[in-house]
Amino acid sequence: MPRVAILFDNFGPYHLARLRAAAGVCEVLAVEFGSSSSEYDWKASESAGLKRVALNEHGSSESLSPQGFQRRLFRVLDDFKPGAVVIPGWGYRGALLALQWALARKVPAVVMSESTAWDDVRKPIKELVKRRIIALFSAALVGGTPHRSYMEELGMHSDRIFLGYDAVDNSFFEAEGLRLKAKGEKERELWEGKKPYFLASARFIEKKNLFRLLKAYAIYRSKALLPRDSVASAFSLEPLAFDLVLLGDGQLRPELEQLRSELGLEDCVQMPGFKQYEELPAYYTAAGVFIHASTTEQWGLVVNEAMASGLPVLVSNRCGCAADLVMEGENGWTFDPANEEQIGDLMLRISCDEDGRLKMGNKSQEIIAKWGPDRFASGVKSAVDTALAAPRKKVGLLDRMILWAITRR
């Protein structure tokens, strides 16, 4: 098996599931830049069976100086002597330091990416620099079809691009859901006997679009509580007003709570806070529909979790996962995240059809089964094999200057 170093900024449960799968097809060293994350509050997860090392064992990668970061990373990679390195992205210090090491040692590098052409404002000068950096990689592992298209725009040949980067541990969510349903655990009893609810899980930040989601939910609720004949005439089904549960936390919580109050939704919108990985299945199991409303999202791994848990999904068409994971009318629908009326109507449509929801949930599990950690592993293996067979990259003075400048920011 090829000897491969796979790097991430910080390991959450997603990363460890992927790394364990990759360790089945490659000899893997899992390199973590920092033992904690400045962005996510997840707890350190068990990594038994993985060869794992952290550059900063006592904090995030951001607390390392550029010189200290480079020294520690180069020492770890020199000691392991990988045949290839698999690097998360291209736009920050750790990734580019790893690329510098690979180029200096003439070791092929694979870039992992979930960027799309439309997830951010693209400026010509930055895109030019990005193209030069991408040209230094020998292969790529990306999320899905929109991400492959963008990688091609940046100059990577299509036969060097592989899918499967964005995966979660499908088996964990499926198994936990079955266990909770079978045993009636206390976590599930929180919602036992209540009607299903819409579930969203996100950090409380602007791009997650939670203010519009609350307004769309208010529209949905006003229609769901109309006299039964009015709704039945539109959908030929019996209406059912679901509650809404927003998992997560963040700086916008006070404003969201205020809007919830202004809309008169205190009794039907729950905000239980951030939940650790092990707590999530209880919420997915009791939910009726999952909704993800971001205005921009490179992928949206919570959608994977919900689908693995057997839920139908309503997903913003600005989420990178939508093109590959949402089959319109089969396991859910996509929507314009700026269109509150459309979101509300879809919430009404899906909440009115219990049999349809169950069929859609089964379809979700069928679709996501093809996008789990095994696909990440096969993508890594294919990308590494392609990179090892490719000619070694030649690095010009301008490329060296670009890498040096960015890593010293």
Image (cartoon, rainbow, N blue to C red):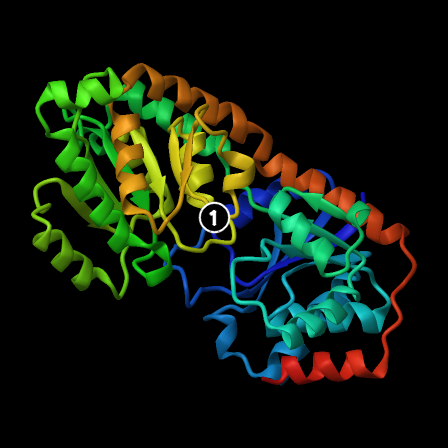
Q: Residues within 10 Å of mark 1 (few under 14, many from 20)?
A: many
Compared with residue 254, is residue 399 higher up or lower down, i.e. above or below? below
The answer to whether residue 331 shows anywhere in this view is: yes
149 lies left or right of 367: right
Q: Residue at x 47, y 25 (%)?
A: 365
The percent position of residue 283, horizontal first and vertical second, equals 28, 36
Compared with residue 95, is residue 274 higher up or lower down, i.e. above or below? above
Compared with residue 97, is residue 271 higher up or lower down, i.e. above or below? above
Quarter of the picture containing the N terminus is top right
Q: Residue furthest right?
A: 391
360 lies left or right of 131: left
Q: Residue at x 45, y 33 (%)?
A: 172
In this figure, which residue is indicated by the disc labeled 1?
A: 319
Q: Residue at x 20, y 31 (%)?
A: 186
Nearest to the observer: residue 180 or residue 288:
288
307 lies left or right of 72: left
The percent position of residue 70, horizontal first and vertical second, equals 66, 78
Quarter of the picture containing the C terminus is bottom right
Nearest to the observer: residue 273 or residue 143:
143
The percent position of residue 17, horizontal first and vertical second, equals 54, 42
Q: Residue at x 27, y 34 (%)?
A: 345
Q: At label 1, which amino acid type do we have?
A: Cys
